[in-house]
C-alpha cells in the first residue's frame, strides 16, 4: 500500500468507523497497523473478515481548506483498507 | 485538566478515583441512553450473561486505574532511552513490560517535541486508553471537545491554558478504530537531575514536573526555560514583598502599625476569596483546621513584628535580620521534624544568628530593643514555614492561603475598634494597595514553586536584601552602615552554604 491514499466518498448506512469529515480526503499512510476485525460486521455480531488497518495522516489544509486554523497542522486517523483508494 | 491545574498541582481532593472532577449531581429524568443502558444491563443479568457482582468488580477494576500508571510509563521513558525507543515502537509491549495489566489495549505512544505537539481525541465516541489511564475526564467525551479539537485544536488548547507558537506543529490523532493513544510529553527543563524514581508518581518531587507540564505553555515568556521562568517569578515575588514592606513602613507614619497589618490581611483575604470563589466549597474545607490556625497565628505574629520592625528600623537592616529565617527553618526541621542536623549546618545556623547580632549590635550605642523585632519575626516566620511543611501536601495551597489571610483579617478586625485611627487620603490608598501587593507576591511565589523546586529557588530569596537596600535609599533616604552590610553578607553566606549542603549530591 503506498503512500498517497484517498478515503472513499461512500455514505453507507450502518456502523462505520470512517469519520464523515475525512471521506473523499487525501492523505498519506503514516504506518500500517496490521489486520483487524471489520467493525462494520462485528457490530452486528457477524463473522468478520480481517481487514488491514492504516494510520493515515491528513493536513488540515486538505480537510478544511485554506481557511483551516493552521493549514500545516495534521490529523491522523485509523482507516481500514477497504475505505482507501491508492493514488499514483 | 485538573492534573494540570497550575493553581493546584499538588493533590486531587474532591476528584474521582481517576483524578478528574466529578460531574455535578444530575437529578433530572433519565435520558434515553441511560434508560437503554439500564434495560440492557437488566436483560444481561436476567439471561445469566453477567452478574451484578461481575459488573461491580469490573467497575472497581476500572476505578483502581489512574493516570498515575501512565505517569510511571512517562517517567521511565524520560530516564531510560532504550525503554523510550521500545515504547515509541510498540506502546502495548513496553507498557506490559513494566508490569501493567492493560488487557487487550493496543497502545500507540506519540511524542511531543519542541516542534510537535500531539492532541488525542475520539470524534466518533470516547475511545481512551482506559486500561492504562482509567476513565477519561468528562470533557474528553463532550461533543464540544470532539467536534472542535479536529477543526481548531490550537484554540481548544488555548482554552486549556496552552498557547502554542506557530512554529510548533499540532498533530491531532483521531482514535477511529482499534488503537488507543497516549502522549509522551517533552521532558521539562530543569528536571535533568531527577531520576526515574524522582519523576514517578507517588514521589513528592513528581509534582515538580507535573507543575512544569502544566505551566510550561501558559506563561507569557515562553522563550525562557521553566527554570528561568520560575526564578524570575520568584524574584518578582520578592520584589512585591519588598514593595509591601515599603508601604508598611510608609503607612506606619500615618496610622498605627496594627492597622497596616489589618489592611494587608484584609486585602489579601478579598483577593484570594475572589480568585477561589468558583470552587470555594472545596477550598474552604481544611483537613487540618488546628494546624491551619497555628500557621496563621505564626504568620500574623511574624508580619506584625516585622511591620513594627520596619516602622522603627531601616528597611535594609530589618530585611537582613529577617533573612536568618531560612537557617532557622533548617534548625527547626532538625528539632521538631527529625531532619538531620550535622555540625556544618549547626555552624551555619550559629553564623547566621551572629550576622543578625552584628546588625542589631546589642549593647552598642545604636542598639534598641526594637532591633530584636525582625529577629522575633524571623522566629515566628520559621515556625510558620515549619508547620506549613508539616501540613505539607495534604492541603491545597489555596486553602492555606485563604486561611492565613482570613485568620489575620478576623483576629485584627477584633482589635481594630481599640486601635483604629482615621486614615488620611495617602493612607487609604496605601491600605487599599498593600493587601493586593502582598497577595500578588504570594501568588507569584506559588507559581514559582510550581515551576521550580523550592530548594533550587532558596538562594534567590536573598534578592530581598538588594530590593530592601534599594527601596530604603530611594524612598526613605536610608543608607545602611558598614556593620549592616557585613551582617547581611554573613547571613546570606550562611544561608547559601546551608542551601548548598542540602542540595549537594541530590542532583
Image (cartoon, coloured by chain):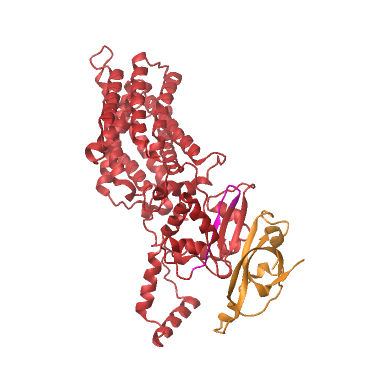
> In this view of the protein, which residue sits in the foreground, A49 or B189?
A49
Percent position (x, y) of residue B310?
Answer: 34, 24
Is residue B113 located in the magenta-colored stretch of the structure? yes
Highlighted range, magenta: B105-116
Work out which quarter of the rendered image holds the C terminus of chain B and state it: top left
Of B478 and B421, the residue lying toward us: B478
Point 50% across, 54% down: residue: B84
Q: Residue at x 36, y 73 (%)?
A: B57
Q: Quadrant of residue B259?
A: top left
Residue nearest the viewer, comparing A5 with B64: A5
Write down which chain is painted red: B
Q: Residue at x 32, y 53 (%)?
A: B285
Answer yes or no: is residue A3 visible.
yes
Judge by depth and name the residue closer to the eye, B415 or B377: B377
Q: Which chain is orange?
A: A
- Residue B449 in the image, given as x and y percentages of width and height: 42, 41
Vertical placement of residue B432 versus A38, above or below: above
Q: Say left or right for B296 vs B225.
A: left
Q: Position of residue B212 (x, y in %)?
A: 47, 46
> Quadrant of the rendered structure where residue A51 is?
bottom right
Would you identify the image quadrant in which residue B30 lies?
A: bottom left
Amino acid at each position: 500500500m503506498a503512500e498517497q491514499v484517498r478515503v472513499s466518498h461512500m455514505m453507507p448506512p450502518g456502523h462505520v468507523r470512517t469519520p464523515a469529515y475525512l471521506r473523499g480526503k487525501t492523505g498519506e499512510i503514516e504506518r500500517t497497523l496490521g489486520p483487524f476485525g471489520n467493525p462494520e460486521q462485528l457490530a452486528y455480531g457477524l463473522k468478520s473478515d480481517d481487514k488491514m488497518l492504516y494510520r493515515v495522516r491528513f493536513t488540515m489544509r486538505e480537510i478544511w481548506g485554506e481557511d483551516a486554523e493552521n493549514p500545516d497542522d495534521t490529523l491522523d486517523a485509523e482507516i481500514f483498507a477497504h475505505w482507501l483508494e491508492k493514488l499514483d | 485538566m485538573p492534573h494540570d491545574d497550575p493553581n493546584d498541582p499538588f493533590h486531587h481532593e474532591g476528584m474521582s478515583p481517576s483524578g478528574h472532577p466529578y460531574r455535578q449531581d444530575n437529578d433530572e429524568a433519565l435520558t434515553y441512553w441511560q434508560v437503554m443502558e439500564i434495560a440492557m444491563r437488566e436483560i444481561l443479568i436476567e439471561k445469566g450473561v453477567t452478574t451484578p457482582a461481575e459488573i461491580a468488580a469490573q467497575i472497581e477494576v476500572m476505578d483502581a486505574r489512574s493516570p498515575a500508571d501512565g505517569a510511571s510509563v512517562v517517567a521511565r521513558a524520560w530516564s531510560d532511552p532504550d525503554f523510550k525507543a521500545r515504547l515509541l515502537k510498540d506502546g502495548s509491549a513496553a507498557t506490559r513490560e513494566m508490569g501493567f495489566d492493560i488487557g487487550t489495549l493496543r497502545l500507540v505512544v506519540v511524542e511531543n517535541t519542541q516542534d510537535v505537539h500531539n492532541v488525542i481525541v475520539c470524534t466518533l465516541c470516547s475511545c481512551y486508553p482506559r486500561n492504562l489511564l482509567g476513565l477519561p475526564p468528562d470533557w474528553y467525551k463532550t461533543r464540544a471537545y470532539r467536534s472542535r479539537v479536529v477543526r481548531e485544536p490550537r484554540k481548544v488548547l488555548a482554552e486549556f491554558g496552552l498557547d502554542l507558537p506557530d512554529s510548533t506543529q499540532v498533530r491531532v490523532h483521531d482514535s477511529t478504530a482499534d488503537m488507543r493513544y497516549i502522549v509522551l510529553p517533552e521532558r521539562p527543563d530543569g528536571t535533568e537531575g531527577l531520576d526515574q524514581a524522582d519523576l514517578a508518581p507517588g514521589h513528592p518531587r513528581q509534582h515538580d514536573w507535573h507543575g512544569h507540564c502544566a505551566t510550561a505553555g501558559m506563561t507569557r515568556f515562553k522563550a525562557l526555560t521553566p527554570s528561568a521562568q520560575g526564578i524570575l517569578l520568584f524574584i518578582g515575588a520578592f520584589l512585591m514583598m519588598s514593595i509591601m514592606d515599603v508601604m508598611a513602613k510608609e503607612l506606619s507614619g500615618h496610622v498605627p502599625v496594627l492597622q497596616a497589618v489589618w489592611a494587608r490581611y484584609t486585602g489579601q483575604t478579598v483577593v484570594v476569596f475572589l480568585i477561589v470563589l468558583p470552587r470555594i466549597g472545596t477550598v474552604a474545607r481544611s483537613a487540618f483546621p488546628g494546624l491551619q490556625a497555628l500557621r496563621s497565628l505564626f504568620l500574623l505574629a511574624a508580619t506584625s513584628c516585622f511591620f513594627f520592625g520596619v516602622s522603627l528600623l531601616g528597611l535594609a537592616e530589618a530585611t537582613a535580620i529577617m533573612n536568618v529565617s531560612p537557617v532557622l527553618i533548617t534548625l527547626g526541621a532538625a528539632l521538631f521534624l527529625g531532619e538531620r542536623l550535622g555540625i556544618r549546618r549547626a555552624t551555619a545556623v550559629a553564623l547566621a544568628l551572629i550576622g543578625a547580632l552584628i546588625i542589631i549590635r546589642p549593647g552598642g550605642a545604636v542598639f534598641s530593643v526594637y532591633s530584636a523585632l525582625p529577629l522575633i519575626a524571623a522566629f515566628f516566620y520559621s515556625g510558620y514555614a515549619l508547620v506549613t511543611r508539616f501540613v505539607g501536601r495534604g492541603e491545597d495551597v489555596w486553602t492555606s492561603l485563604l486561611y492565613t489571610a482570613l485568620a489575620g483579617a478576623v483576629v485584627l478586625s477584633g482589635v481594630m475598634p481599640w486601635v483604629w485611627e482615621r486614615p488620611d487620603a495617602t493612607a487609604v490608598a496605601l491600605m487599599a494597595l498593600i493587601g493586593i501587593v502582598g497577595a500578588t507576591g504570594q501568588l507569584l511565589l506559588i507559581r514559582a514553586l510550581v515551576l521550580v523546586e523550592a530548594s533550587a529557588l532558596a538562594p534567590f530569596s536573598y534578592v530581598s536584601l538588594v530590593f530592601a537596600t534599594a527601596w530604603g535609599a530611594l524612598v526613605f533616604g536610608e543608607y545602611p552602615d558598614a556593620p549592616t552590610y557585613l551582617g547581611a553578607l554573613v547571613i546570606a553566606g550562611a544561608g547559601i552554604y546551608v542551601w548548598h549542603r542540602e542540595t549537594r549530591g541530590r542532583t
